[in-house]
Image (cartoon, grey):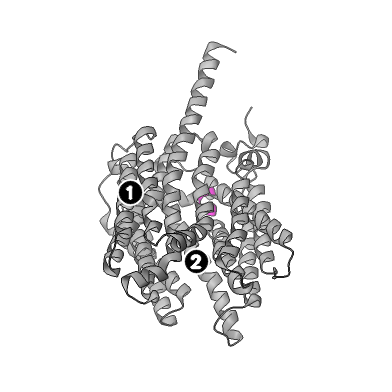
């Protein structure tokens, strides 16, 4: 080996290490953000008693967080380009951490809602800007590992959040569900300052204010409609009205972005087949199925099996271990099989394992339940990582900021849509029986419907060319000599 080759290999190794470190730094902040979104629901009754209000009134804290986040997500890419991704990411962590502190110190519902709104604003910038940082610091050959690192918080936090939140609420107090973010946020900011380099666009252009208003309003109404449909409050008219408003405003925003010279969001990324399929069409449907599962499983074990929250949590931990177990083999599998085969066949495994959960009963052997949950966790992890990586495999440098923002917007929609579909099936199945609460048979319908969505979305990936994303996956069959 020549000196030049040795030097080049050393530079590549250093670049790979830098990309992993940056991805880990971003993952720490993502974990804090996603954990907060799942942990708070467990403490709402205790918070209601502390604020001297009805428990149902506490739902506004979740709703305002979600709506504020929806309003600011479209702005994230432009802010990162205008002021530097590192600076905006650091600011988002600081805002989120400070708001978490004041949420934990709130003495009334009004105070809590105000700080939750600020927390949502910080959260809105964190995910898309953090992903932009990872994309800019990783070569294509390093993208699978980098995306896998920033995907694990989305896989693990929703599973362990309710368990951890229940433990904290039971043995400490609801305040610590927010105060736990303080050391994580401080650590995240310190890591960003130490390891994340500054990168910014030379000329991001002026803010497309009209595009911001239209896209923010459209996303907010869409998510509000989905959130309201899950709660099943106020009848069908408000849901339909908000959904219609969200669709109309989103169409107007799309037409605006296609007509102006310097749009807030560059929609040209949707012309890239790998991005479009993994985020908008098949990818959204696939995420709907996968995101419905963490919502359905705790309800199945508690309402269908009659287990306590702690006993249900032990089953969820097996699911969580499955999510972690796939991380070591994700890169080798993608290299050996390629994105198309993985997304189709692993997607089918994920979908069928979801459907199979509907046929579990309290009499099912525990070993079989554990094995099925572990398999569902493994396939869920693989599918998420493959989708998130393929989305940016062919996106050009100039499209990355908008692509990251668009991806975040669509993932928020798919997350709530998955819960909304599952909740709707449960409610319809219960209503057909003339009952108010779901029973085991109702969960069977929910899991089967969600699994069917997963099957159909997985088969859609057959439309991808065999070599899709080969430069990123390192698929040996299509590597150039």
Residue drawn at the location 45% of the way across and 53% of the way down? 407
What residue sits right under mark 1 in the picture? 92
Residue 390 lies in the magenta-colored region: no
The residue carrying mark 2 is 417
- Rendering coords of residue 352 (x, y %): 68, 61
Query: What segment is highlighted magenta in the picture?
Result: 274-278
- Report crowding for label 2: few under 14, some 14 to 19, many 20 or more residues within 10 A (C-alpha): many
Q: Residue furthest bottom?
A: 434
Residue at the image point whose x is 34% and y is 40% from the top:
86
Q: In which quadrant of the rendered view does residue 247 lie?
A: bottom left
- The tag earlier along the polypeptide, 1 or 2, is 1
Callouts 1 and 2 close, C-beta under 8 Å:
no
Query: What's the magenta bit mostly, secondary-structure-wise?
Result: helix
Looking at the picture, does residue 269 appear above or below residue 115?
Answer: above
Note whether residue 387 is visible. Answer: yes
Q: Which mark is residue 192?
A: none
Q: Is residue 246 left or right of residue 481?
A: left
């Amino acid at each position: 080996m020549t000196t030049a080759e040795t030097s080049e290999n050393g530079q590549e190794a250093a670049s790979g290490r830098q990309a992993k470190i940056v991805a880990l730094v971003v993952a720490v902040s993502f974990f804090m953000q996603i954990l907060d979104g799942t942990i708070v629901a467990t403490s709402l009754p205790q918070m209601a008693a502390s604020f001297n209000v009805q428990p149902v009134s506490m739902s506004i804290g979740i709703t305002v967080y979600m709506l504020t986040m929806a309003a600011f997500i479209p702005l994230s890419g432009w802010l990162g380009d205008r002021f530097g991704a590192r600076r905006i990411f650091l600011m988002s962590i600081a805002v989120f951490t400070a708001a978490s502190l004041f949420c934990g110190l709130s003495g009334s519902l009004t105070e809590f809602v105000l700080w939750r709104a600020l927390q949502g604003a910080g959260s809105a910038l964190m995910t898309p800007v953090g992903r932009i940082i990872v994309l800019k610091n990783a070569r294509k050959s390093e993208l699978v590992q980098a995306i896998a690192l920033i995907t694990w918080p989305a896989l693990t936090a929703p599973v362990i959040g309710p368990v951890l939140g229940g433990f904290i609420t039971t043995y400490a107090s609801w305040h610590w569900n927010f105060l736990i973010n303080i050391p994580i946020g401080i650590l995240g900011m310190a890591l960003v300052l130490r390891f994340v380099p500054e990168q910014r666009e030379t000329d991001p252009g002026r803010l497309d204010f009209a595009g911001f208003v239209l896209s923010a309003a459209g996303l907010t109404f869409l998510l509000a409609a989905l959130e309201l449909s899950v709660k099943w409050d106020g009848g069908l008219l408000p849901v339909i009205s908000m959904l219609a408003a969200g669709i109309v405003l989103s169409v107007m925003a799309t037409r605006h972005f296609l007509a102006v010279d310097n749009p807030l969001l560059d929609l040209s990324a949707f012309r890239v087949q790998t991005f479009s399929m993994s985020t908008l069409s098949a990818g959204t449907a696939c995420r709907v199925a996968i995101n419905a599962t963490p919502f359905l499983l705790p309800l199945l074990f508690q309402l269908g099996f009659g287990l306590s929250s702690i006993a249900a949590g032990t089953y969820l931990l097996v699911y969580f271990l499955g999510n972690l177990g796939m991380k070591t083999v994700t890169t080798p599998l993608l290299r050996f099989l390629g994105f198309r085969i993985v997304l189709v066949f692993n997607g089918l495994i994920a979908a069928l394992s979801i459907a199979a959960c509907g046929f579990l009963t309290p009499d099912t052997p525990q070993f079989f339940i554990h094995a099925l949950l572990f398999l569902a966790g493994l396939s869920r992890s693989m599918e998420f990582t493959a989708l998130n990586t393929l989305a940016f495999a062919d996106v050009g440098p100039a499209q990355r900021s908008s692509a990251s923002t668009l991806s975040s917007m669509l993932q928020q929609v798919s997350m709530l849509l998955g819960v909304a579909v599952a909740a709707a099936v449960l409610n319809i199945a219960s209503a057909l029986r003339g009952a108010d609460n779901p029973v085991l048979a109702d969960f069977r319908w929910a899991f089967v419907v969600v699994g069917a969505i997963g099957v159909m979305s997985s088969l859609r990936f057959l439309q991808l060319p065999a070599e899709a994303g080969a430069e990123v996956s390192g698929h040996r069959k299509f590597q150039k000599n």
